[in-house]
Image (cartoon, rainbow, N blue to C red):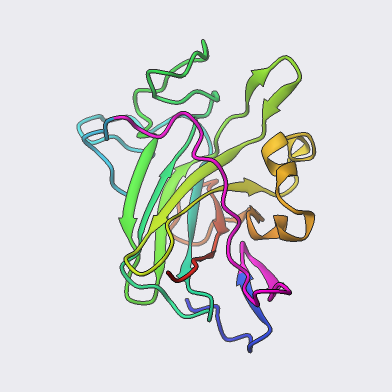
Amino acid sequence: MMQVGLGAAAVVVAGKKIPRASGDGTCETPAQTAGPFYPKQFPADTDLDLTQVEGRDERAEGDVVYVGGQVLDEDFKPVSGALVEIWQANKHGRYDHEDDPSTAPLDPDFQGFGRVRADEDGNYSFKTIFPGAYPVSEDWTRTPHIHFKVARRGYHELITQLYFAGQELNEKDLLVQQIPEDERDRVIVDLVDGREGDEAGAWRCRFNIVLRKV
C-alpha cells in the first residue's frame, strides 16, 4: 500500500509521519554501522521467510514479526528494484556467525539473513523472529534490532538498523543514542497485531526507508 500521499511536507517513515528535515530538505533514513555479523558467506537459503530454513521441518523459535515497507527516494517516490537485505540475532540474542562469541543457543531453524527485491512500487516484506537482546560489555546490552542494507543503482547504499518502540534498552543503547534525537523516529517502529492470514500470535511493523540519490 502506498504511503506517500502526504503532500510535500511529510512522509510516513517507520510508521510515523516525519517532516522534511531542515537544511538539505530531505528525511533520509539515518545510516548506522553494519556491525561485525554481516555474513562472510551467504547461507544457501536467503529468501524472505527467515522463520523456515529450506530442507528443515521446524519453525524458528520465538515470536513471529512481519516486517515490511517501502523504499523511497528524497522526493518520496518509490525506488523499484532496490535490493533489501536483513540480518539479525535469533530469539536468544545470538547470530549464526563464526565471529559471534556468545554462548547463547543457536537455532538451526532460524535463517538469520534474508534478501528481496522491492517491487515496482518500492514495497518489500520479510517474515522473521523478534530478535533477542545481547550483551556487548559489562555495561552495555544491545536492544532488540534488525540490520538493514539497501542498495539500488543511482542511489547511495544505505546500512541502518531497525528498532522497536517501547523497549527499555533503547534508552541505554549506545547506537540508538548516537542518532540525533529528532531523527530516531525514522528507525524506531511500532509493533501492531498481525492481520488475517498471518501466523497466529504474530506481530507486524512497517519500516519505510528513504535513500539519497547519487
Instruction: Pinpoint residue 105: horizontal percent, then vertical percent.
Output: 47, 15
Name the residue at the bottom extreme. Answer: 7
Residue 62 appears left or right of 84: right
**Chief secondary structure of the magenta span?**
loop
The residue lying at 27 percent from left, 31 percent from top is 41
Query: The C terminus is located in which quarter?
Result: bottom left
For residue 10, say whether it is visible: yes
For residue 49, say whether it is visible: no
Residue in front for this viewpoint, 198 or 72: 72
The residue lying at 34 percent from left, 23 percent from top is 108
Determine whether 135 is above or below 210 in the image.
above
Residue 198 magenta: no
Residue 29 appears left or right of 16: left
Residue 146 appears left or right of 82: right
Instruction: Pinpoint residue 13: horizontal percent, then vertical percent.
Output: 61, 67
> What span is in magenta?
13-40
The residue lying at 71 percent from left, 72 percent from top is 21
Residue in front for this viewpoint, 202 or 46: 46
Instruction: Pinpoint residue 4: horizontal percent, then vertical percent.
Output: 55, 81
State which quadrant residue 170 falls in: top right
Determine whether 69 is above or below 100 in the image.
below
Residue in front for this viewpoint, 152 or 170: 152
Instruction: Pinpoint residue 71: horizontal percent, then vertical percent.
Output: 45, 67
Determine whether 201 is above or below 123 in the image.
above
Q: How many marks?
A: 0
Name the residue at the top extreme. Answer: 103
